[in-house]
């Protein structure tokens, strides 16, 4: 006959674990993703900084240049000749400094393949713009002033679009790859349209594309932390 268990009698070893429900691995995965995102923001920086920074640089810098050039060479806003290039130059320097600081934060605490990939990708950017400087300085004096601006902005934007697409392909990031394709398409359309239109397209469509990418990354980050 079955007998009642006496008070205080312990379950056999493993009985308590067997009575528990199996762990929910989806919850465990979500918890890991949240903690990784928090850790990345604390010690590794936030990649959205790049896109917000350069989105604003393009929006304002190329926007001022469009106002100074106009769509067909007639300025929309009268300003001294050096104002628009100076504004764009200052913004570009600020963007470069921000990028360097953010890159150090992102990769300064990492080791192994991630760190190597980040450093090699950064080296590719430096090499691309070194070539840009050589090409631009060699050819620009053969062109009229408006075409000189188109040469510099068109080649630099072309490098940016290609490198974004390459980075998206390497890291299998669809948002980054799509941004590279978008920037490249905007650049080609602007070059065909002419210097003034090129500046306008880079300001609104190019800078806007960078800012939209930052919004996409923000939504993705919130989804991982939810």
Image (cartoon, grey):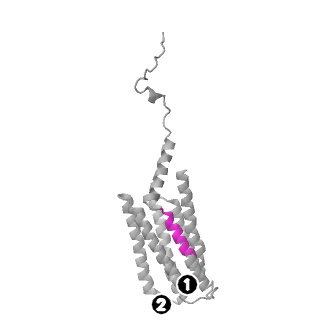
| Mark 2 or mark 1: whose residue is earlier in sequence | 1
Q: Main secondary structure of the magenta part?
A: helix
> In the image, is residue 121 part of the stretch drawn in magenta?
no
Q: CA distance from mark 2 to mark 1?
A: 22 Å
Q: Is residue 194 above or below residue 186?
A: below
Residue 211 percent across, percent down from the top left: 57, 67
Image: magenta residue range: 46-59
Residue 140 percent across, percent down from the top left: 47, 87
Q: Is residue 180 visible in the rendered structure shown here? A: no
Residue 121 percent across, percent down from the top left: 41, 66
Q: Nearer the viewer, residue 39 or 125?
A: 39
In this rendering, position of residue 68 left or right of residue 40:
right
> Which residue is located at x 47 percent, y 54 percent?
38
Nearest to the eye among marks 2 and 1: give it: 1
Q: Is residue 135 above or below residue 161?
A: below
Badge 2 vs badge 1, beta-carbon distance below 8 Å = no
Q: Secondary structure at mark 1?
A: helix
Q: Which picture quadrant has residue 146?
A: bottom right
> In the image, is residue 47 part of the stretch drawn in magenta?
yes
- View extreme (right): residue: 76
- The residue labelled by disc 1 is 84
Q: Which picture quadrant has residue 112?
A: bottom left
- View extreme (front): residue: 7
In this rendering, position of residue 115 left or right of residue 203:
left
| Label 1 packing within 10 angstroms: few (<14), some (14-19), many (20+) | some
Residue 25 percent across, percent down from the top left: 49, 41
- The residue labelled by disc 2 is 142
Q: Nearer the viewer, residue 221 or 196?
A: 221
> Which residue is located at x 60 percent, y 82 percent?
66
| Label 2 packing within 10 angstroms: few (<14), some (14-19), many (20+) | few
Q: Is residue 99 visible in the rendered structure shown here? A: yes
């Amino acid at each position: 006959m079955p007998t009642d268990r006496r008070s205080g009698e312990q379950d056999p070893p493993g009985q308590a674990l067997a009575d528990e429900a199996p762990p929910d691995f989806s919850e465990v995965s979500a918890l890991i993703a949240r903690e990784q995102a928090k850790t990345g923001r604390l010690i590794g920086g936030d990649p959205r900084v790049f896109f917000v920074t350069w989105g604003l640089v393009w929006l304002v810098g190329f926007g001022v240049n469009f106002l100074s050039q106009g769509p067909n060479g007639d300025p929309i806003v009268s300003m001294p000749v050096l104002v628009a290039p100076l504004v764009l130059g200052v913004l570009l320097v600020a963007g470069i400094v921000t990028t360097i600081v953010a890159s150090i934060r992102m990769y300064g605490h990492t080791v192994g393949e991630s760190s190597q990939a980040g450093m090699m990708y950064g080296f590719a950017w430096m090499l691309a713009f070194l070539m840009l400087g050589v090409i631009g300085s060699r050819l620009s004096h053969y062109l009229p002033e408006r075409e000189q601006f188109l040469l510099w902005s068109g080649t630099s934007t072309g490098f940016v679009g290609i490198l974004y697409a390459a980075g998206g392909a390497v890291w299998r990031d669809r948002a980054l790859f799509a941004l590279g394709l978008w920037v490249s398409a905007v650049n080609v359309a602007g070059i065909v349209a002419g210097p003034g239109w090129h500046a306008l397209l880079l300001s609104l469509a190019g800078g806007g594309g960078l800012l939209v990418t930052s919004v996409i990354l923000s939504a993705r980050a919130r989804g991982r932390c939810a």
